[in-house]
Image (tube, helix red, strand yellow):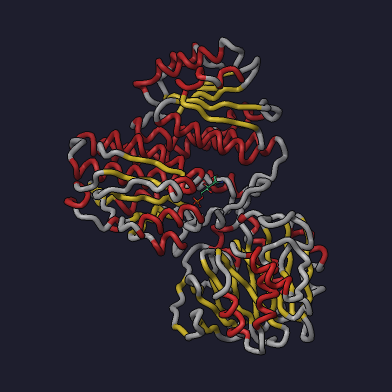
Amino acid sequence: MCGIVGYIGKKQAAPIILDGLARLEYRGYDSAGMAIFDGERINIKKSVGRLKILENLTHDGKMMPGLLGIGHTRWATHGAPNNENSHPHFNEDETIAVVHNGIIENYLALRKKMTDKGYHFRSETDTEVLAHLLDYYYKGNPLEAITKVLHRVSGSYALGIMFADHPDEIFAVRKDSPLIVGQNEDGCFIASDVPAILKYTRTVTYVENQEIVRLREDHMHFYTVDEEEIAKTPVTIDWDANAAEKGGYEHFMLKEMYEQPKTVSDTISPRLKGNEIVIEELNMSDDEIRAIKKIHIVACGSAYHTGVTAKYVMEGLARIPVEVDVASEFRYRNPILEEGALVIVISQSGETADSLAALRESKARGFKVLGIVNVVGSSIAREADNVMYTWAGPEIAVATTKAYSAQLVALYLLAIKFAQVKETIDEIEFDGMLEDLKRLPDQIELLLNNKQRIQRFANRYIGAKDVFFIGRGIDYAISLEGSLKLKEISYIHSEAYAAGELKHGTISLIEEGTLVAAVSTQPALYQKTISNMVEVKARGAFVLAVTCEGNKEIEKAADYVIYIPETNAYFANSLAIIPLQLFGYYVAVGKGCDVDKPRNLAKSVTVE
Ligand code: M6R
């Protein structure tokens, strides 16, 4: 979702801002713009579509000289993606420029108020009210104007602001939308996310809710909304900068799929100490684990799908009831949380607005929240009571793969740990599961190395209109993710169904040649799924089966079979998802889709 980059320092600002925005492209956007102070006035250039257009328009920033500026990639919420609605937004006399990520919820009332005061609006955005409000309250002191505005707006915002008559400073503000600031020997930076400025500095400070930062060439000052100065401690980012580069792969998604053996191993290994699972971050004694009466898992998208898998694994292994909710539903359904409940919020970005709201709702009711998060220092990581990190490193492709796989194994570890403490599994089962977990990275690698067969198969379905994914139990959870991978990047309509549910309506959509991907990794359910495959085949479907080695019987009902190596049935998701990710990827590549940045999607969904 919208990306913000700002710079003030000794270097030309525009190329740095363009470079930073390019590194935020993965967040999703439909227009871009930047404001640069040229020594006399603030100049703004905007363009609709890819950042490349803005780069060409400004000759890679050379046409916009100046040592300070703010830039933005916009993911449209209020008003179509056009030049007027693109950021930055000016006040009327073009002396104040603002970029914004988030939603100003009371913008209609504010817009009316400012219109009544004689202000004219050029765009349909909620952001423009901020520019006019700043103008209204500005009497020469930017900090004072900003705090007055903040007291009057509600909603979420990360802002970059500049004032033409204060050419030695830019401002950053945040509430419920991510924002960081950084510094090196040449200047100071604002960014929505670390990759934007990692090339320039590893010293960053996370801006907290309702904090204001005044950035100058050689220092930064932090303030509360009451203009009181506060001290902040920067952190050093220790990622490998190459982790956010394509490294020779055609797409980030392909690279990230290939990183899965490592991310799975990196997430498991630090928590295996000898023959024990040690999850220190859980901060729970064995007695506290035994006291868990129910687990509520809350997440969105693919993270929700890992939660659906976890329900089967946790209930099966640890015999703890699990309720899984889509975060946007959880927060408004007045969920029943009772004593002994543990809330787990799963999120790659750690910034998903609905997941964050669900976390806050749970905490407000007095329940402890465990975050399973990938981005270190993100909002969910900071606000959760305890955080179990998935060590997947930066994930750039909008379609998640490696973070999904890391979430899965983090959840397996939790389930096995709970089961061991509750003695719902015996020692032999426990040891066997650890061995199976340790084998997963190599098995994933094996599946990735056999990609040609899936690639060939995918090429046959580039023209498909509808694809159905079916499975039972954990295989249903795998189907949900397989279907999402395909539709989000290839734009082919696809749905996932519990295999037994198909004949309650959806089977009427099956026509001659419709592709049905049947996932069948649970030996106890093999026969049941075969029956469902036969039903769709009888109606003309072409059946692709994903099953475990040895299940030869499936060949009688399937037209094409992909085998995954043998593992514990509870962990089959980690293997079966690999061919489905590859299938979605190769269909999208074959169709010529923008795989890493699918239309309309954002990597980090920071608005409701
Ligand atoms: O950052 P999060 O894990 O909270 O994001 C949740 C979803 O937005 C995300 O999984 C989304 O569904 C992806 N596009 C799936 O590939």
Res. 135 image quadrant: bottom right
* Frontmost residue, 350 versus 122: 122
Q: Where residue 133 sits in the image (x, y, percent)?
A: 66, 76
| Residue 601 appears in view | yes
Residue 250 appears in the figure: no
Where does the image place residue 430, in percent across and percent down from the top left?
23, 38
* Residue at the far bottom in the pictured view: 140
Image vertical order of residue 427 relative to residue 397, above or below: above
Q: Is residue 145 above or below residue 334?
A: below
251 to the left or right of 272: right
- Asked if residue 98 lies left or right of residue 48, the reply is left
Position of 548 relative to 384 (above/below): above
Q: Quadrant of the N terminus?
A: bottom right
Lateral position of residue 530 relative to residue 593, left or right: left
* Nearest the eye: 102 or 289: 102
Q: In the displayed structure, would residue 84 be above or below residue 579?
A: below
Farthest front residue? 116
Residue shown at 67%/25% (left/top)? Answer: 460
Residue 426, image x, y percentages: 18, 35
Percent across and percent down for residue 362 are: 36, 55
Left or right of residue 102, residue 163 in this image: right
Q: Quadrant of residue 216?
A: bottom right
* Residue that appears at 66% across and 78% down: 134
Q: Total marks drawn?
A: 0
* Residue shown at 68% from the left, 71% from the top: 113
Residue under the image location 52 percent in, 68 percent down:
175
